[in-house]
Image: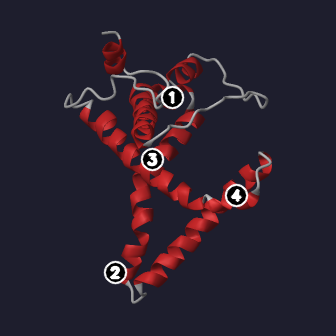
Amino acid sequence: MDYTWSQQIAGRRAVYVPDAVALAADPEDLTYLRKQVWRWMAGFCQNVRLHLGRLILHKPLLALWVLLALLEILTAPVWWATPLVIASTTDEPPALAFLWWAGAELLLTTPPLLYAAHRRKLPVGHVLLNIPCVYATKAVNLVYAWKALIVELLLVPLHLSRGLTVYEKGRADTPTPRTALAGTG
């Protein structure tokens, strides 16, 4: 992201290559998922801190998308709290407020999943069965996105934190410095 944004600010163009393939390896457990998501979210916020001003000047459309991503992170807790707000401010029973919210959420979440299943030729039933995992992933992402906002966009500029300074892989196939040293003795 840093390289791409820097190059775009310098006047180069990013292009979409539809035939590009990027093989991904999912984290093997919660420890590695946390490391991976923290690295992604902190890295995004670091790049916002470093490049947003120049993006606004040189790449305003990209800056708009970045600002929309930040807005989504900031407003997500409000959306997740909507059932509680509805139940506490209206005469709606909590279960009905939750069902309204869940229905609206499914209307927003299902079309991209169906499109992705179609595009990747995946069984639609299997994709839809994984919808609960989508919400678990959203919750983990939200926690680390807010942590990154606070650390990288607030505490680092105030010199109260160094932010993300150590690159930790999100997978177990590369030894950490500690296990690498332990294995050499």
- Badge 2: residue crowd in 10 Å (few <14, some 14–19, many ≥20): few
Disc 2 secondary structure class = helix
With 166 as the anchor, is 127 left or right in this view?
Answer: right
> What residue is pinned by disc 1?
55
> What residue is pinned by disc 2?
88
Disc 4 secondary structure class = helix
State which mark lies toward you, 4 or 1: 4
Q: How many marks?
A: 4
N-terminal of the pair, mark 4 or mark 3, is 4
Q: Nearer the viewer, residue 59 or 87?
A: 87
Q: Residue at x 34, y 17 (%)?
A: 177
N-terminal of the pair, mark 4 or mark 1, is 1
Q: Are marks 1 and 3 in contact (CB under 8 Å)?
A: no
Q: Residue at x 43, y 36 (%)?
A: 32
Residue 141's disc number: 3
Q: Which quadrant of the view contains residue 158? A: top left
